[in-house]
Image: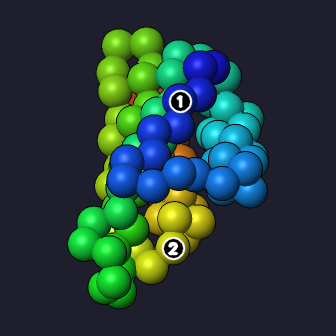
Amino acid sequence: MELKIQAIHFDATEKLNAFIAKKAAKLEKTCDNIIKAEFILKVVKPETAKNKETALNVSLPGTDLHAEKVCDTFEEGVDLCVDTLLRQIDKYKERQGK
């Protein structure tokens, strides 16, 4: 699985990158035919609460899955996006008959 992390309007820390890599591994454990996982992290309007926008795009054979959350921290956003995508992957696997 190819992992891509995009940080828009800020520099992602090593700690945040490691956290994302750990969560991506959880996705890969659930579904081994993920082609690419792309995390897009964006700071929207600095100085306000809930200004961290996290989007997660996962490419699977024949389909792309997407989740987007706005939270106080990127860790929370990544957690919620991964949880959402785990449910979407389960549905995808059911449709595939696996």
* Residue at image mark 2: 73
* Residue at image mark 1: 4
Percent x, y for residue 81? 46, 56
Q: How many marks?
A: 2
* Amino acid bearing label 2: Thr
Q: Quadrant of residue 57?
A: top left
Binning the other alpha carbons within 10 Å of mark 1 as few (below 14), some (14 to 19) or many (20 upward) gives: some
At 51% from the left and 22% from the top, the residue drawn is 36
| Above or below 12: residue 47 | below
On screen, residue 45 versus residue 75, left or right, reads left
Secondary structure category for the residue under label 2: loop
Q: Quadrant of residue 66?
A: top left
Q: Do the residues labelled 2 and 1 touch (CB within 8 Å)?
A: no
Q: Quadrant of residue 31?
A: top right
Binning the other alpha carbons within 10 Å of mark 2 as few (below 14), some (14 to 19) or many (20 upward) gives: some
| Above or below 15: residue 35 | above
List the single residue furthest toward the left: 45
Labels 2 and 1: the sequence-earlier one: 1
List the single residue furthest toward the top: 61
Percent x, y for residue 1? 63, 20
On screen, residue 84 versus residue 18, left or right, reads left
At 46% from the left and 33% from the top, the residue drawn is 38
Quarter placement of the C terminus: top right
Frontmost residue, 5 versus 55: 5
**Label 2 vs label 1: CA separation?**
19 Å
Percent x, y for residue 8? 37, 48
- Residue 91: tell me if it is visible: no
